[in-house]
Amino acid sequence: MSISRTTGGQSFGPALYFLLTFMLGSYFTFAAVQGDYGLFQRVQIIAETDVLRAERDHLRQQLQQMENRTLRLSDGYLDLDLLDEQARDRLGLLRNDERIIH
């Protein structure tokens, strides 16, 4: 007499393994794309870096212009044209033969 085993269904081991593997893979894929160190965050950081570099370059250019004007109005080097321009602009000075048109 042989005793045969009949099971009501298949074993849940392979299905559970597949489900666990799928869930872990999905989690790590989501974290790689949208996590704190994911691809979307990297693209945002690169864009912010480009904006900040452009702003830095603009500020450097403004600094160079201010340094140039400061040098041109210093005691050691006096640019009379710049001094005349600044006096007219800041103090509203005019020559007798000039007219202001608004």
Image (tube, rainbow, N blue to C red):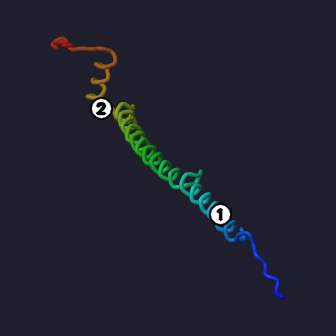
Please, what is the three-letter code of the amino acid marked with disc 2?
A: Asp
Q: CA distance from mark 1 to mark 2?
A: 79 Å
Please, what is the three-letter code of the amino acid marked with disc 1?
A: Leu
Q: Is residue 97 above or below residue 76?
A: above
- Asked if the residue under mark 2 is in contact with the one under mark 1, i.e. CB atoms within 8 Å, the reply is no
Residue furthest left in the image: 97
The numbered mark at residue 19 is 1
**Picture residue at 17% right of the left edge, 12% below the top:** 99
Of circles 1 and 2, the one toward us is 1
Front-most of residues 102 and 31: 31
Q: Is residue 86 left or right of residue 45?
A: left
Q: Is residue 60 left or right of residue 14?
A: left
Place residue 55 in its image quadrant: top left
Pointer 1: residues within 10 angstroms few (<14), some, or many (20+)? few
Residue at the spot of label 2? 79
Image coordinates of residue 81 in percent, x first then y, are: 26, 28
Q: The N terminus is located in which quarter?
A: bottom right
Residue furthest front in the image: 1
Q: The C terminus is located in which quarter?
A: top left
**Picture residue at 34% right of the left edge, 34% below the top:** 72
Front-most of residues 56 and 71: 56
Q: Is residue 13 left or right of residue 75?
A: right
Residue furthest right in the image: 1
Place residue 25 in its image quadrant: bottom right
Secondary structure of the residue carrying tag 1 is helix
Image coordinates of residue 83 in percent, x first then y, are: 31, 26
The numbered mark at residue 69 is none
Secondary structure of the residue carrying tag 2 is loop
Image coordinates of residue 36 in percent, x first then y, are: 59, 51
Place residue 85 in its image quadrant: top left
Front-most of residues 84 and 53: 53
Front-most of residues 31 and 80: 31
